[in-house]
Amino acid sequence: MEQQIVKVKNKKGVRVIPGFGLSMGVTLAMLGCLVLIPLASIFISASQLKPGEFLDVVTSRQVVSGYAVSLSCAFFAALINAAFGIVLAWVLVRYDFPGKRLMDGLIELPFALPTAVAGISLTYLYSDQGWIGSIFAKIGVDIAYTRIGITIAMVFVGIPFVVRAVQPVLEKLDRQYEEAALMLGANKLYTFFRVILPELFPALLAGFGLAFARGIGEYGSVVFIAGNIPYKTQIAPLLIMTKLEQYKYADATAIALVLLVISFLLMFLINSIQIYMQRFSKA
Amino acid sequence: MKKEEDLEKNINPDAVGDGIHSIQKVIEPPKHASRPIVKYILIAVSALFLLVMLVIPLIVALVNALGDGWAAYKEAVLDEYTLKALALTLLATVSAVLVNTVFGMFAAYLLSKFYFRGRQALATLIDIPFSISPVIAGLVFILTFGNIGWMGDFLKAHDIKIVFAVPGVILATIFVTFPFVFRELFPVMNAQGNDEEEAAALMGAGGFTIFRRITFPHIKWALLYGVILCTARAMGEFGAVSVISGHLRGKTNTLPLHVEILYNEFNTTAAFAASSILVILAALVLIARNIVEWKRK
């Protein structure tokens, strides 16, 4: 979306390349049938709800706590991912060391590994009998079936988004500004925070936003480790699922609609900040 | 006696001193380069993070799959329902990849070679499935094709089953992976511009010839990359499929759903054994991804 749109029409406004009609037709038909029409159903169904009913569902204690769990855990997971994502991108771009290619290849693992598999592995690992969970259980920290567990699962699914957003920008970053900063007497840390980080910030924000959005909607890897304790570790997507299993389609639609609006608002907000920052940096 | 002497030789104080000295040499900051200690700390932090977050969970899955021995593993993998679930997963993946490749090529061609009103809006619409929760993706199909959906009566009259049947699983998989191929193709085709295509068109080439001879050679690696990502995501889709499949064993169960069922039945070994098939497929996808990336450069 951030790509510069190149003007592809000549001065007279005549399209020389054939295939406009065909590709437009195929694109719109497929997008319409497979995405837009099904998506419209949610708005059609929601419009049949009475406003009072809708409010009752989405303001019930269980649903509000579901949103709170999803949003807070996804936010912290995205923050952790932003921090580690920058370190990982930095290490992968700036340093040479044995095993670097392997490390680079591993970043995509959460994309490739099915979420259900990740979910049961993480649960097993962090439960109080698991390899890592048992260590933490000794000092009295439970990870599985708490919000910490949910956050860890969301960190797992979100990490590639941040690394892959920051990495190409860091690769293209002109090193002369850093060198200039260092020459002028800034130390490394100061240079990083005042010269490099501002350049990376739009990409970091995009990665953060994608990881955040993915975390809010994530179901497969979270549902196992969450334990689904009402009011404590029930995530919003799980509530939709539960309502569906009870054949309460109206309730499920209402919860889904709010979740949908939250993720659209989030993407819109992050896009706006990015556009604003790009203008700001160019001016 | 001789052995002891050898041992003494091995712990020769000079040799140890040398070792420490050489380590010190490495740690000592060279005059021009940045301090390597920061480098090592950052590399160590990254490696530790990846180890704890990504590698160990993977090892856990494989270790547990073989936890009850090789025979139990083989039995779990060759179970009738596991194989049927695998077949459905592969069917859904292949369908999603085919549909999304066709869509991705047409959409990327349209958005990169032509300028028209609403182009940006169209690009945003294509990205929608990316930011939607998989559970909601499944829900929209129930609300469209299910008994309560607005197409429900029509489908019932014609005896077509989509929800809680194989077509629903395929549709949900297509939905969640919809923008994948497009997103890989579009930046490449956009950066390419359209001078070459215009020249070919002015010299009288037809649309298909232009695509095949001019556009395609530029995008083949990006296309393959998109197909690989799409395969990975389609194979592992859980949330959307979970909503729409109805969990009918041997009929609408995909492999990730089968893993869930086994896990919820406390049949942990079988769950991890079925997972290991997916882990192996994921590993193949990752290897393919890295080969493609390497070839692209």
Image (spheres, coloured by chain):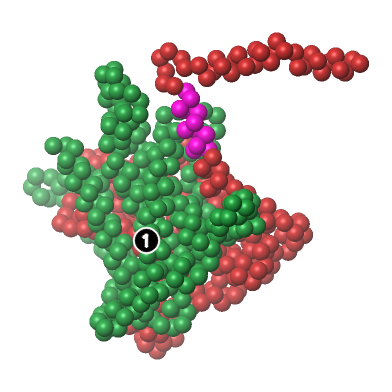
Rendered shade, chain B: red
The quadrant holding residue A127 is bottom right
Quarter of the rendering occupied by the C terminus of chain A: top left
State left or right for residue B295 relative to residue A210: right
For the question of whether residue A86 can be seen, the reply is yes
The residue that appears at 54% across and 75% down in the rendered structure is: B247
Is B40 part of what is drawn in magenta?
Answer: yes
State left or right for residue A254 relative to residue B89: left
For the question of whether residue B226 can be seen, the reply is no
Q: Residue furthest top?
A: B14
Question: Mark 1 highlights which residue?
Answer: A71
The residue that appears at 40% across and 69% down in the rendered structure is: A66
- The residue stretch that appears in magenta: B36-47
Rendered shade, chain A: green
- Going by the numbered disc 1, the residue's amino acid type is Leu
Image vertical order of residue A41 relative to residue A74, above or below? below
Magenta residues, dominant SS class: helix
Q: Residue furthest bottom?
A: B157
Q: Residue furthest left?
A: A12
Task: Please state which of residues B177 and B109 is positioned toward the viewer in this rendering.
Answer: B177
x, y (%) of residue A227?
53, 67
